[in-house]
Each structure stands twice: as C-alpha cells, then as structure tokens.
Image: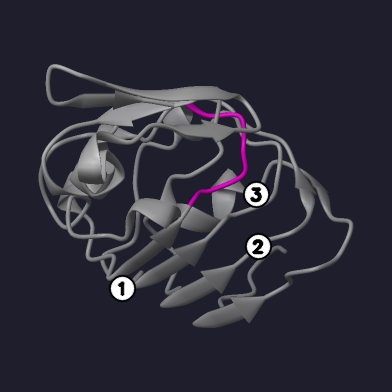
Amino acid sequence: MGLANFTDIDVSRNRLEGDISFMFGKNTSLIYADFSRNLLRFDFSKVEYFSKSLRGLDLNHNMITGSLPVVLVDSSLDRLNVSYNRMCGRIPVGGRLQELETTSYFHNRCLCGKDKTVSKLKWAGQSFVTNYGHIQYDNDVVHL
C-alpha cells in the first residue's frame, strides 16, 4: 500500500489473505475500515496502536487469532465487529467495548467478558450452542 492513506476502505467479500494489521498504525487516517468476509490471518492481540481517527472496524468472518488488544479501550471506535473469527481471551474492560452489541463478539473460539457486553446472553437463564461450543454463564462471565 506504500504511501496511500485512506479514510474509508471497504474490501469486504473478497478472498484477501494475510496480515492487514499495518493498516491500524499511528500514521494512518482511517475512519472506517471493512475487511469482513475474507481469508485474513493475523494475531489481533499484537496490534499495538489504533489511529484516533478510526471510528468503525469490521473484521467479521475471517481467520483472525489472538485476543482483543487492550489498546482498544483507548480507541475512538463506535463500531467494532470481530465475530466469526478464531479469537480467544477476555474482552478488555473500558472504553466503548461494553456498549457494543453482543453479536460483535459471537462465534469466536473463546472470547469472554463481563458487564454489559455479555449480559444480553444470559436472558431467562438460557444457554446457547454455537459453532465452537456451548455458551455457559459462570460468575458474571459468559464462556463462548
């Protein structure tokens, strides 16, 4: 991508492969990025910085591993969708991450969290079955 600097990019529904984590660096001016429904593979937890201008990030339906980076707490994201990946670990507490829809985190290996983010999953004491296992409510934590 060289010196190209985008504010909005939508390359969804392609067969893009590889690591696009360089797109989130300090020197980018991205406001909205949609990389959903591709074949992207990288460790999301290794992303160390998100541009303050980034408001929306859609990474659903890829093969992304790792966990949600703690730096997301300090981001300006209004929208984030990491559903249908291979992520694991706790959802960091803070920022807007607990305000996002629960569906933003669905169908990952073992993302879990507490507070508002996952409280929507425990309605009426029900449990749900996903592609990757059973959702179980346990001590204010939902295990996917």
Q: Is residue 85 magenta?
A: yes
Q: Earlier in the sequence, mark 1 or mark 3?
A: 3
Q: Out of 104 and 123, give the one closest to the viewer.
A: 123
In percent of width and height, residue 31 lies at: 41, 77
Side of 128 where 60 appears, left or right: right
Marks 3 and 2, how far apart in space? 9 Å
Element under label 1? loop
Side of 28 where 99 appears, left or right: left
- Crowd rating for badge 2 (residues with CA inside 10 Å; few <14, some 14–19, many 20+): many
Name the kind of residue labelled 3 in the image.
Ile
Name the quadrant containing residue 38.
Answer: bottom right
Q: In this view, does 18 lie above or below 12?
A: above
Quarter placement of the C terminus: top left
Q: Do the residues labelled 3 and 2 touch (CB within 8 Å)?
A: yes
Side of 137 where 18 appears, left or right: right
- Crowd rating for badge 1 (residues with CA inside 10 Å; few <14, some 14–19, many 20+): some
Q: Residue at x 19, y 43 (%)?
A: 119
Name the kind of residue labelled 2 in the image.
Phe
Query: Which residue matches tag 2?
Result: 35
Which span is picked out in magenta?
Answer: 82-88
Q: Residue furthest right?
A: 15
Query: Which residue matches tag 3?
Result: 20
Name the quadrant containing residue 8.
Answer: bottom right
Marks 1 and 2, how far apart in space? 17 Å
Element under label 2? loop
